[in-house]
Amino acid sequence: MMKNSITMLFICCLTMASMNMTAQPILKTHVETGDVEGILDGTLAVYKAIPYAAPPVGNLRWREPQPAQPWEGVLKAEDFGPWPPQPSRRDGSNPKMSEDCLYLGIATPATSINDRLPVMVWIHGGGFQTEHYGGDLWKHLAMRGVVVVSVEYRTGALGFMAHPELTKESKNGHSGNYGLLDQIYALKWVQRNIASFGGDPSKVTIFGESAGAISCSILCASPLAKGLFRAAISQSGGSFAPWSDSGRTLAANASQKGAEQQGLAFQKHLKKKSLKQLRKMDALELCGDNVGFGGFWPCVDGYVITDDLYRLYERGEYNDVPVIVMTNSDEGALFSRSMQPEDYKKAAKGLFGPFADEALKVYPGNTVDEAFHGNGDAFRDLGFAWPSYAWVSLQSKTGKSPAYAAFLAQPSKLSFSGDPRRRGVAHADDIMYLNGTFLTQPDKYPAESAVAEILQQYWVNFAKTGNPNAKGLPYWPSFDVSKPTTMQFSNGASLIMLPNKEQIDFVDRFYKWKREETESQRKSSSKDK
């Protein structure tokens, strides 16, 4: 009898040990370039820096990403990789920067490579000039049963400078958009390797904020990204405004300064005679504090970006996947500034041209405070709200996959905008609803914490199924401008009509005129040639 009891006890111990072993997330695994080991963070295995491409240094500067080199032994992915070269942080921190920056991070709750969990790939913001892929964003989402990947990519001049010599040496006849090519290369890496972390390569959702959201819209329209993801989430961004600004197209025409000419101007600014000399410069001299030349941005190069995204979506020429597109109620507060009413009106006339009088009715500025809010609201709608509306509106007309519209309006004292005149959710405040800022302080921020919980549930449901809806949440229909289909996140979640519709309608008319002007100039230029 005692012998049987000892045997049973031994079996129970083995069973419990086995259960403990199987409950541990995947801390060691193998990718195409070698073995890699992460760290345990609660119930997650976290890999902070895995190279997905070769360092883009030397002759690889301003070239498409190349394969990462294999390594021997086990790569300890315990520390974040360096930030891409960029101006100093406004918060006074001094992160390590290096042109060798093509790394990605992974957080996985999977306990087996056979788990086949949905995958969410985060693309950071920063105006294509700054920021870094690292942080705690992944923890709370990953703990809900998804593998989260965060991607670093080249920014600033290193990531987006076009140049005639670069176009000439490219076998695909393009230049610029290297940061976007990095993102695409990382997504291909995910397709080949994410199963080693318990992820399902057929269930990849890309998501990003600001420049990361703009990147998502571009990836949704790029033929190079076709088949690399099945859904997308945009937080404050979409590349649907008219591509008529300086540097937004590759080559110049009679009325535009093209991106290549911007690269030549940059070369002249740095007092260099050739691309060869630019490649020999220190990376920080190209993207640091004292460069005094900015504004590098994705351009229509005919390769990564084949045309104005608005036109592509009008024609139905895009990667038709389900999307969630969200904007914040007071995006422009982060960018607005105090102006005298006369200066504000002068700026409005310069920006809106023949639409200036109507703009000043929609965005009045008869006092200093009114000008601050008018400027901020115009920035919100021109840069974020209208592009987001255009995205869901066009996809609802020309696509087969659903487009879901969201509006974050939760009042909070905590904000990335330090201006006390802020009236709502400023640009980048949405990140706090994903990174645990509010969820970890429910007593201090009860309303924000409740919204963060709902928002994260929708995001993860969407990653798992391509549909944000699930039992226990308010039903969220796909976008229809004639119905209350925009999900507003404020003291919970509820459906509303298109927010700020008067302003959106005005911007829609203004941008239609801009597109027609650009097209007329393009045709005139073609005739001249």
Image (cartoon, rainbow, N blue to C red):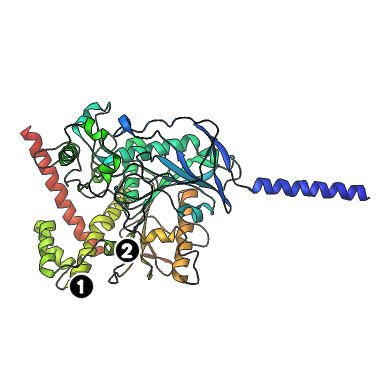
Q: Secondary structure at mark 1?
A: helix
**Total labels drawn:** 2
| Residue 59 placement (x, y as % from top left) | 30, 29
Asked which quadrant contains residue 305, the reply is top left
Amino acid at circle 1: Asp
Residue 346: image tag: none
- Left or right, residue 397 beside residue 445: left
Vertical arrangement, residue 376 with respect to residue 59, above or below: below
Q: Give residue 384's quadrant in the image.
A: bottom left
Q: Is residue 474 visible?
A: no
- Amino acid type at image mark 2: Ala
Viewer-closest of 408 and 482? 408
Q: Looking at the rendered structure, which numbered label has been put on residue 369?
A: 1
Residue 475: give x, y in percent of width and height. Answer: 45, 61
Would you say 300 lies left or right of 457 here?
left
The image quarter in which residue 230 lies = top left
Identify the residue at horizontal 29%, vertical 55% (top origin).
389
Instruction: Identify residue for label 2.
Output: 426
- Compute the Cα span from label 1 to label 2: 17 Å
Q: Residue furthest left?
A: 528
